[in-house]
Image (cartoon, rainbow, N blue to C red):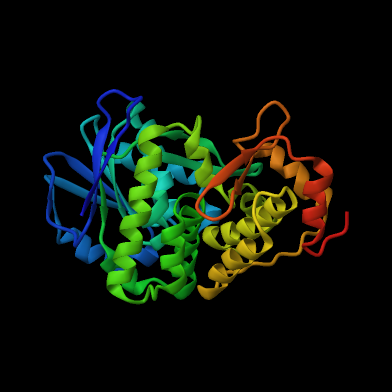
């Protein structure tokens, strides 16, 4: 299956997302694969057997969100200079969302921009992170606050890479799938309520549906000026959870799941969603063993972190909330008292 990306506001920016067994890839330039030891141990030999290039190198960086930093990007850049890459050279991001984000960001920086492609190996990166051109790194102030919109030349999604994925990593990807369904497609949500994603065909259907939905959004709004912000449902809260726990306690998708529950509570308070629908969403998250609770230590600190969110502007926090199941509402005028009332339900003291 091929899903096209055609960015209507960016001239000549088109590429394909291919969902199928990985075919043979032939390049006429220097190629550098960026990966981590975990992915390399399972899959690098397979990938190398699928690539032909006049010169091929592998850069391996540490595995984990805590290494998603400018320091790591600089290490990758130094390797590219060592290999004497030029502007016609190509990077391949081979791994999960961290690898994809950093490889894309590095590609945007090296000699002011070289090509890269995505070959995602986690469910989260296959259904979300590899699609749409968001790249970047974290810093002490928050997640992905340094980065660029930089589109790959192609994305190759092979579900077979998921066979070695640990259960937690798989569930983290399902959180992003559920996010898409809640925001855009009630029928898809109901499919997920019944689906067994350990079944290969059901999983392929879920990946294809999620990628198609994300492509539809990105094609309209590459740089998050409008509808693309909706893809951050659960993230405004979830990014604070990640920051408070120093990116060590929760995988990204797990933090997003917690953030979705928090967002749903706020939506119930604002009359946007019924409690029974919020409960359905929570139950679906728990069906896939995702966390739905979190103990906030200090409500005021948690609330203040919202203002570092990239979607906030002019002193207003932008919340992406469900409007029933299958629709959304962007709220920029939520009363601080109501938001903190919701936060206090997560075992905190003000």
Foreground of the two, 265 or 299 = 265
Q: Please tell me whether residue 214 is drawn above or below residue 220 in the rendered image.
A: below
Q: Residue at x 50, y 73 (%)?
A: 288
Percent position of residue 254, x then y: 56, 63
Left or right, 171 with respect to 77, comes to: right
Q: Residue at x 54, y 58 (%)?
A: 252
Q: Residue at x 35, y 62 (%)?
A: 206
- In the rendered image, residue 271, in percent from the top left (x then y), is placed at 71, 50
Nearer-the-camera pick, 118 or 190 = 190
Which residue is at the front of the view, 222 or 135? 222
Q: Position of residue 19 (x, y in %)?
A: 24, 56
The residue lying toward the viewer, choosing from 291 and 188, is 188
Q: Please tell me whether residue 289 is drawn above or below residue 158 in the rendered image.
A: below
Quadrant containing the N terminus is: bottom left
Q: Quadrant of residue 28?
A: top left
Residue 344 appearing in the image: yes
Quadrant of the image occupied by residue 116: top left
């Amino acid at each position: 299956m091929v899903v096209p990306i055609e960015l209507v506001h960016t001239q000549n920016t088109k590429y394909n997302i291919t969902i199928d067994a990985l075919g043979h890839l032939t390049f006429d330039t220097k190629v550098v694969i960026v990966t981590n030891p975990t992915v390399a141990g399972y899959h690098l030999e397979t990938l190398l057997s699928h690539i032909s290039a006049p010169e091929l190198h592998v850069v391996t960086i540490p595995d984990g969100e805590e290494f998603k930093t400018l320091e790591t990007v600089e290490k990758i850049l130094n390797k590219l200079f060592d290999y004497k890459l030029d502007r016609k050279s190509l990077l391949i991001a081979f791994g999960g969302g961290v690898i994809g984000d950093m490889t894309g960001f590095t590609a945007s920086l090296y000699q002011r921009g070289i090509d890269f492609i995505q070959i995602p190996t986690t469910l989260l990166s296959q259904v979300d992170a590899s699609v749409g051109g968001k790249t970047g790194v974290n810093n002490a102030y928050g997640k992905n606050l340094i980065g660029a919109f930089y589109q790959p030349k192609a994305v190759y999604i092979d579900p077979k890479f998921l066979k070695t994925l640990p259960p937690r990593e798989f569930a983290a990807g399902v959180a992003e799938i559920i996010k898409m369904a809640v925001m855009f497609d009630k029928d898809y949500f109901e499919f997920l309520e019944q689906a067994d994603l350990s079944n290969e065909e059901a999983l392929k259907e879920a990946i294809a549906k999620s990628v198609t939905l994300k492509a539809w959004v990105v094609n309209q709004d590459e740089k998050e000026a409008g509808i693309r912000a909706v893809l951050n449902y659960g993230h405004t809260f979830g990014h604070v959870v990640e920051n408070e726990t120093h990116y060590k306690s929760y995988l990204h998708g797990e933090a997003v799941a917690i953030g979705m529950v928090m967002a749903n509570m706020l939506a119930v308070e604002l009359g946007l969603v019924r409690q029974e629908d919020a409960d359905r969403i929570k139950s679906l998250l728990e069906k896939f063993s995702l966390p739905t609770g979190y103990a906030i230590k200090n409500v005021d600190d948690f609330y203040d972190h919202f203002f570092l969110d990239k979607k906030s502007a002019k002193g207003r926090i932008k919340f992406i909330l469900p409007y029933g199941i299958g629709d959304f509402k962007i709220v920029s005028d939520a009363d601080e008292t109501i938001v903190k009332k919701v936060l206090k339900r997560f075992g905190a003291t003000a």
